[in-house]
Amino acid sequence: MRFASQDWVLSWALLLLLSCTTYSSTAMGKPENNIKTDVFLSPKFELGPGSVVNKDYLDVDFPRGHVAIKSFNAEVVDESGKSVSLQEVYLHHWLVVKYHQPKNVSHNNSTDNIVPVRNSGFCQGDTLGQYYGLGSETRGTDTDVPDPFGVEIGNPSEIPHGYEEKWFINVHAIDTRGVEDRSGCTECRCELYNVTKDGDGKPLSPYYRGGLDCCPDNSQCRLKKGFKGPKRSFYLKYTVKWVNWDKYVVPLKIYIIDVTDVLNKSKGMSPEHTCKVEYEVEPCNKGYNSSACIDVKRTSLPMKTGGYVIYGVGHQHAGAIGSTLYGQDGKVICSSIAKYGNGTEAGNEKGYVVGMSTCYPKPGTVKIRDGETLTLEVIYNSNERHTGVMGLFYFLVAEHLPH
């Protein structure tokens, strides 16, 4: 099997060709007439120059009943509903998580007896259990699911007796107005936030230069001397498309693979997945040709139950080149390439990842076998150091095709 690190220019040219010839950039098929669309707002959050919000909002508005989700996307807007540029408020990530809670809970924000409901991905515990989630690339990334497929929610048979299905949203956003180092703030460099301990109060490793531990909720990135600006109010606006569930909808399973996942096989028949979620890209040796400065990280993981791939997309941060999911025989399952903006308007911000290409293989053409080992390869530009980067891959799988 040949990976991009061996001859990255040729390899990525081939991957781009594959993604253009094998996959479509838009959902396949005509949308059904009964697709419903609604736009919701998260609770309001406030940000001042250099400040950070990283909050969970429980029991948010969401489609109710037994339905199939066809699309989910989100962005930050101001109080007037106007899209906010990443150059002002950087959307580090947003996550949408399903959970069950007893019906007799008296108030919406209670965490009493919450039972999170994970996706089908490999990471364990409370790591990467979301149903949906993206970051700065959210406006420019397709999320539509082709007919007759959908992500099933609200199935009464899957909700424990006496419980109800609810959703919470996590929003991690950074106001970069007036900051001393904008890219350093968005990459959560510890020295810019003056953070030395993690969320549990334990000292951070001297080798940990930046990441989620250094930009927690209510933290502050260093501002230019004398800069002052007002606090502003924002919302996460999320748009959901869905159809009522019926026998013609084919259910999809959500998988998320993390390139930092290390499989502990010493656990015998139930190996443990350790997902660190983020990592650091070391700067390239200055003696190298800058065009060859790439950081390649990969992991290989067995997929217990396979199926047909219907959709795929990578999630990366600034410095991203792209990511590819390979099958066991080296075939490309999906290649997702980073798109950068070249302007100032929302959705086209220069220097930011504003979209990731997506894969929509013709249903039935890309199948993962039961027990097949998948390899995820993630590539970043390493001309400079990048802290707190991510290498996640989302893909939707149908265990069977429509008759």
Image (spheres, rainbow, N blue to C red):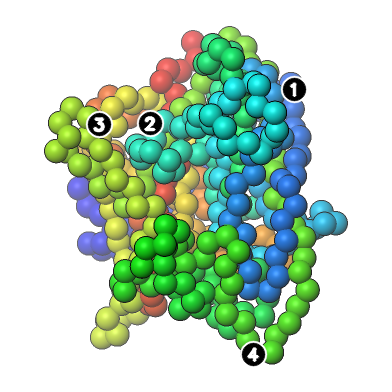
Callout 1 crowding tier (Cα within 10 Å): few <14, some 14–19, many ≥20: few
**Dot 3, crowdedness within 10 Å: few (<14), some or many (≥20)?**
some
The residue under the point 52% across, 53% down is 356
Q: Quadrant of residue 151?
A: top right
Which badge, 1 or 3, comes first in the chain's sequence?
A: 1
- Up the image or down, 26 lies above or below 341; here it is above
Q: Quadrant of residue 369?
A: top left
**Residue 190 seen:** yes
Which label was assigned to residue 366? 2
In this figure, which residue is indicated by the disc labeled 3?
A: 372
Q: Quick one: label 4, few (<14), some, or many (20+) residues within 10 Å?
A: few
Give the CA distance from mark 2 to mark 1: 28 Å
- Please give the name of the residue rendered at 55% of the width and 49% of the height, measured from the top-left corner: 134
Q: Is residue 6 above or below residue 42?
A: below
Residue 282 image position (x, y, % from top left): 32, 72
- CA gap between label 4 and label 3 equals 55 Å
- The alpha-carbon separation of the residues under discs 1 and 3 comes to 38 Å
User: Which label's residue is closer to the chain start, 4 or 3?
Assistant: 4
Please tell me which residue is depicted at 60% across the width and 64% down the height of the picture. 218
**Which tag is nearer the camera, tag 4 or tag 3?**
4
Amino acid marked by disc 2? Val
**Helix, strand or loop status at disc 1:** loop
Q: At which x and y percent is residue 204? A: 36, 67
Disc 4, SS: loop
Given contact means CB atoms under 8 Å apart, are the residues at marks 4 and 3 in contact? Answer: no
Tell me the distance, in whole angstroms, between the alpha carbons under discs 3 and 2: 13 Å
Pinpoint residue 358: horizontal percent, then vertical percent.
51, 45
Give the distance between the C-alpha atoms of the residues marked 4 and 1, in whole angstroms: 56 Å
Query: Between disc 2 and disc 1, whose residue precedes?
Result: 1
In the visual, does 255 lie left or right of 32? left
